[in-house]
Image: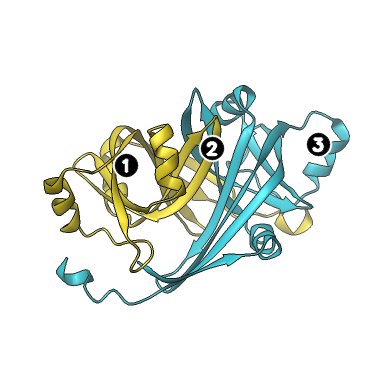
Chain colours: A yellow, B cyan
């Protein structure tokens, strides 16, 4: 698909789309190398909550807490993408963990013991795309 | 959604899914901070081709050529995600650019002058998810 029009979204519009998303992609950097993980998210009040099993994601965030979450939705005609950046921290305070337990966040894998991670969003951006017909698709 | 089962895919299975994808997400690192961009991709022969306008993505890859592409597909019942890592380079050789012009890769935004970037994939991994019912979704 190829966008005929790209509209920059306001932070408010971007937050609205992010808060309506249950699935996102987390990118982190380790030793200057990027990595991406799909995960369930819960975004509200300027923060993004997700769960992670002990393992790669958590280990990578312990080395470098800069995190970015991307969420998007695309059809063949329209699409949008929101990117939220900030610092990630593991929730260790029992009151915070209890509040996270009450959130609508779903675990990514059922029955897996997980740790909550929260990103305090420092910047958010979003774009909306309108895709046109691809008249030359068949001849390329 | 919450996965009841997670299946690790073979490199061959991962490549098959990647090669069938037209939309992916590129993650890069700049000064130790991750960034993500949705884009059109064309994956074949161990490489991933995409186009980028002069701007952020290209500038970031010029600083650090480590790149990762994630592509996925999710419904409420099943999903898969493939992550491919490697080094990115801008195509400058005219024969390579002509070959890229003949590829089925679509530009992301119509009419925008773009540069081709190719990732030589060094590692690929994929996972398939089966999501179960969420009996407690309504009461959390």
Residue under the image location 65 percent in, 57 percent down: B18
Question: Residue A138 got which mark?
Answer: none
Q: Is residue A1 above or below residue A32?
A: below
Q: Chain of mark 2?
A: A
Looking at the image, residue A125 sits to the left or right of residue B57; the answer is left
Q: Chain of mark 1?
A: A
Which mark is nearer the camera, 3 or 2? Answer: 2
Callout 3: 10 Å neighbours few (<14), some, many (20+)? some
Q: Nearer the viewer, residue B126 or B25?
A: B126
Q: Position of residue B94 (x, y in %)?
A: 86, 31
Q: Furthest residue to the left? A: A95
* Mark 2 secondary-structure assignment: strand
Between the residue at mark 1 and the residue at mark 3, the CA separation in whole angstroms equals: 36 Å
Q: Is residue B77 above or below residue A86?
A: below
Which residue, given by chain and number where applicable, does mark 3 sit on? B97
Q: Position of residue B103 (x, y in %)?
A: 77, 49
First in sequence: mark 2 vs mark 1: 1
* Mark 3 secondary-structure assignment: helix
Q: Chain of mark 3?
A: B
Q: Nearer the viewer, residue B98 or B25?
A: B25
Residue under the image location 47 percent in, 33 percent down: B34
Q: Position of residue A115 (x, y in %)?
A: 30, 51
Q: Position of residue B68 (x, y in %)?
A: 59, 42
Q: Are marks 3 and 2 in contact (CB under 8 Å)?
A: no
Question: Residue A34 got which mark?
Answer: 2
Which residue, given by chain and number where applicable, does mark 1 sit on? A14
Looking at the image, residue A73 sits to the left or right of residue B107; the answer is left
């Amino acid at each position: 698909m190829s966008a005929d029009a790209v509209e920059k979204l306001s932070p408010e519009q971007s937050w609205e789309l992010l808060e309506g998303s249950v699935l996102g992609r987390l990118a982190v950097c380790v030793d200057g190398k990027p990595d991406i993980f799909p995960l369930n998210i819960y975004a509200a009040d300027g923060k993004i909550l997700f769960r992670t099993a002990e393992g790669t994601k958590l280990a990578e965030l312990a080395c470098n807490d800069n995190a970015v979450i991307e969420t998007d939705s695309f059809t063949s005609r329209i699409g949008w993408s929101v990117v939220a950046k900030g610092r990630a921290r593991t929730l260790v305070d029992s009151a915070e963990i209890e509040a996270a337990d009450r959130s609508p966040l779903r675990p990514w894998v059922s029955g897996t013991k997980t740790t909550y991670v929260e990103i305090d969003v420092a910047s958010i951006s979003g774009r909306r795309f309108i895709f046109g017909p691809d008249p030359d698709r068949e001849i390329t």
